[in-house]
Amino acid sequence: MNIPMVDIKKQFLEVKDEVYREWGNVFEKMQLMLGENVRAFEEEFSSYCGCKYGIGVNSGTDALVLSIHALIPEGSTGVITPSFTFFATPESIVLTNNIPIFVDIEPETLTIDPEKLSSFLSTLERNREGHPVYKGITIKAIIPVHLFGNPARMDRIIEISRKYNLKIIEDSAQSHGAEYKGKKTGGLGDASAFSFYMSKNLSAIGDAGMITTNNEELAENMRRLRIHGQTEKYRHEDIGYNSRLDEIQAVVLRAKLKRLEKWNKRRNDIARIYLDELKELPIELPHILHNSKQVWHMFWVKCRERDKLLEYLRKNGIGAAVHYPLPCHLQKPMKDYPVVTTMEITEETSQNILCIPIHQHMEDKEVFYVIEKLRKFYK
Ligand SMILES: *Cc1c(COP(=O)(O)O)cnc(C)c1O
């Protein structure tokens, strides 16, 4: 049996008829960028997240970059980020001429550890605006990452951010539809960045992204930034970007958004089966979190013999993968940026983690095949 990590073909077949019909209309009108489907999708997706505004952009990375740019236009400030995330999170901080400040994750959610963060911040002097200052770097924002579909501990993060006057930019690239205490990710901070890259819970058929926010002025700024800082044709108010969402992608995203709840539910059902059937094995499994609805972007296991297990699963046709083998603070371009807490959970997780396939089109027999192979490995 061959079980991939994602099956974008099956996803596409499910929406194909609708998509082909709508594409027909798009090609009839030839309004290809930022047209009616983009506007409709911005409206549909932002309201799905419980948010007032949505700004469609080119990618999740751009969604982060535009959010940081709009919230801290002055640059040269410190932005707090976990190290255990996809590289684009700290990369977007550097791309906007800011400084990533790396903090460890907590073992239960694998998201940024608010207690370690809070202890670090409490040691710092603060400037007149109440911003903490670390070795001459004024810290103005934090990017919690809702990793693998798990919301970060937002009530603690919001509390800390109020105390230290930090802007919150959620990295929601892996958490479409996830909830924290009954509220969807995307509306829990000042702005939130979503990616619709092919492997995400909601995906386009190429690159695409969106920023959600409840702040009207910020939304206006970001709308301007995505087209060269333009206010009207050939009038430029800022140095911006070229980061438009196109109609081809918006049509696909609208069709898939209608199925997202159903798809996330199927992921959750598979996760329950894994948790139940694998609990006797000598591996660590993800926790069910009581304050959150997780959307299982990834299903991880942790074990000491990770590399052997990975090789064995791959040999058996199971598309297992390591997310992420090298934490961001140890990546070459990041090595000069500050690491301000111990990194034991980040480093231990990178060494022991393995993700096994979980996606909405997996059939029960495929789920049980993965379980059977895992059991066999430990026999
Ligand atoms: C995918 C991802 C991004 C980047 O999104 P792109 O659309 O690939 O640019 C950023 N952060 C995290 C956590 C991601 O998983």
Image (cartoon, rainbow, N blue to C red):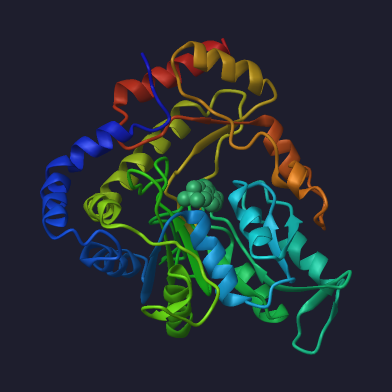
The quadrant holding residue 48 is bottom left
Residue depicted at x 18% and y 58%: 30
User: Which residue of the protein is positioned furthest toward the bottom in this rendering?
Assistant: 128
Residue depicted at x 39% and y 17%: 369
- Residue 317 pos. (x, y %): 43, 15
- Residue 34 pos. (x, y %): 30, 65
Q: Report the quarter where the C terminus lies.
A: top right
Residue depicted at x 46% and y 85%: 217
- Residue 340 pos. (x, y %): 82, 58
- Residue 155 pos. (x, y %): 58, 69
Does residue 42 show up?
yes
Does residue 174 show up?
no
In the image, taking residue 160 as reference, residue 320 lies left or right, namely left
In this orientation, which residue lies closer to the viewer: 62 or 47?
62
In this orientation, which residue lies closer to the viewer: 27 or 346?
27
Looking at the image, is 63 positioned above or below residue 189?
Answer: above
In the image, taking residue 312 as reference, residue 345 lies left or right, namely right
In the image, taking residue 9 as reference, residue 324 lies left or right, namely right
Q: Report the quarter where the N terminus lies.
A: top left
Total tally of numbered discs in the picture: 0
In this orientation, which residue lies closer to the viewer: 123 or 230?
230
Residue depicted at x 61% and y 32%: 284
The quadrant holding residue 43 is bottom left
The quadrant holding residue 160 is bottom right
Looking at the image, is 65 positioned above or below residue 360?
Answer: below
